[in-house]
Amino acid sequence: MWTWIHKFGSPPHAYRILGNLAPWFGWPALGLILLATWWGLVKAPADYQQGDAFRILYVHAPSAWMSMFIYVAMAVAAGIGLIWRIKLAHAAAAASAPIGASFTFLALATGSIWGKPMWGTWWVWDARLTSELILLFLYLGYMALRSSFDDPQRADRASAVLAIVGVINVPIIHYSVEWWTTLHQPASVTKIDKPSIAIEMLIPLFIMIVGFQLYYGWAISRRLRGEILRRERNASWLKASN
Amino acid sequence: MHRAAVSSAAGLVFKRDLMLAWRRWDEVAQPLIFYVVVTTLFPLATTPDLSQLRVISGGVVWVAALLASLLALESLFRSDVEDGTMEQWVLSGQPLGWLLLAKVASHWVLTGLPLVVMSPVVGTALGLPFAAWGTLVLSLLLGTATLSVLGGIGAALTVGVRRGSVLLSLLVLPLAMPLLIFGSRAVSMVMDGDSPAGPLQLLAAIFFLTLSLGPLAMSAAIRISVES
């Protein structure tokens, strides 16, 4: 197994494997996202309380899930890179951050649009939205730290430490924000909160989450290839393969 | 290496930093002045009415204390890295985490502690009742100490970076948000007549977690900054 890891860790192999892998993520992702969109927008029944407005859930909830998932994945990759000094793991963490930040932004934007018909305002200091906002700050801080070093190795290792400190803090931030809102939340908001979601509404949600995960697989394969090209631009194997 | 050597090396670092600060005490006073100036901004921006200010007084004192201690953190490791002292520490064979923790502790004594001592005065000026003094001081004691360690990690990461101070705030402020939530809630709970034990205990828990894991992260970050 170790030889396999070292083999995959070498840039030429990783570059080739990722190139072969990308379509296996990309096409199923496209198919599942289209299926879930049709299912969620057309086939699923309207909510008895929120009407058709709830359908934005099919974008909001999966992107919120992906924003958390990618942060943890990024921290795990950064930890692997820091402990075993695998450059490819650092590159994967670097490639993940903008994707994760985009999903966080998407979750915030859809949450805000959803809030307009539900709460009557574009923004409510609701626990989930607030912790998504802080998560966005964490992503932005990570990317800002990475971009402020000229030396890529130092950028890799410094931002890896930050990602690990951040991932320890994410649950603390999440629960503190939850505790903070339960003390302030007016009762009218919690009433609208979905009590129990019907199964025919849930199926497209799961399909969408799987689709988003596959999309992440596709995007990370593509971005990681770009990252490898950027880091290895002077390497001889690149000249040889052209 | 035995325990005595570790604690005496850390003690020497602590004493040295206090002595250096004592010789340039005007730099120590600056965050404190900044703290008072920031709290003055809030009544000017909102209202001079004490009964309205009282509602937000705990939060204002907390936000000002966060910003003032962040302001001082930027230069925490800078001069030691620039003149090569930090390199000697990394090579000295002493546990780097302890030395850095001693540095953070002396930094806290010089900036965090004066802020805490000053806070009842500032709070009173914003209409904070006498009954909330104890909670405010206790929450700020735990909060500024935690922030010093968190900020130490940030300062260690950004030590060689251009325009590090803005970046440092960007990195540390999101991590400090739980402190702000628990600290200012503890104060407002006391003002509402509730017991602030819950948030204070949570603050203490975060303090001990940060104190135990923080030096590891700090020394890893310093090694990265010094070695490359």
Image (cartoon, coloured by chain):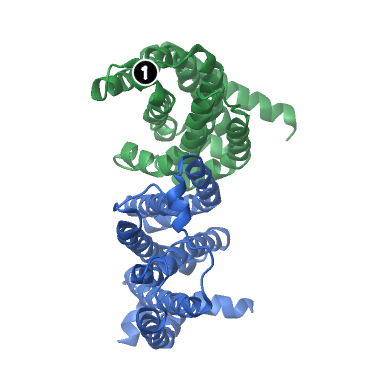
Q: To which chain does the residue with label 1 belong?
A: B
Identified at 46% across, 34% down, the residue is: B180
With B68 as the anchor, is B91 left or right in this view?
Answer: right
Residue A39 picture quarter = bottom left
- State the quadrant of the N terminus of chain B: top right
Q: Residue furthest front?
A: A48
Identified at 37% across, 72% down, the residue is: A55
Q: Which residue is mark 1?
A: B51
- Chain in green colour: B
Residue neighbourhood size for the residue with mark 1, other residues' Cα within 10 Å, grouped as few (<14), some (14–19), many (≥20): few
Looking at the picture, tell me which residue is in the foreground, B189 or B116.
B189
- Does any portion of residue B103 appear in the rendered image? no
x and y percentages locating residue B185 in the rendered image = 50, 32
Tag 1: amino acid: Ser
- Does any portion of residue A21 appear in the rendered image? yes
With B72 as the anchor, is A196 left or right in this view?
Answer: right
With B60 as the anchor, is B214 left or right in this view?
Answer: right
x and y percentages locating residue A162 in the rendered image = 47, 50
Does residue B92 lie above or below A162 as drawn? above
Q: Residue furthest left?
A: B45
Identified at 30% across, 61% down, the residue is: A113
x and y percentages locating residue A240 in the rendered image = 34, 85
User: What color does chain A have in the rendering?
Assistant: blue
Q: Secondary structure at mark 1?
A: helix
Looking at the picture, tell me which residue is in the foreground, B222 or A211.
A211
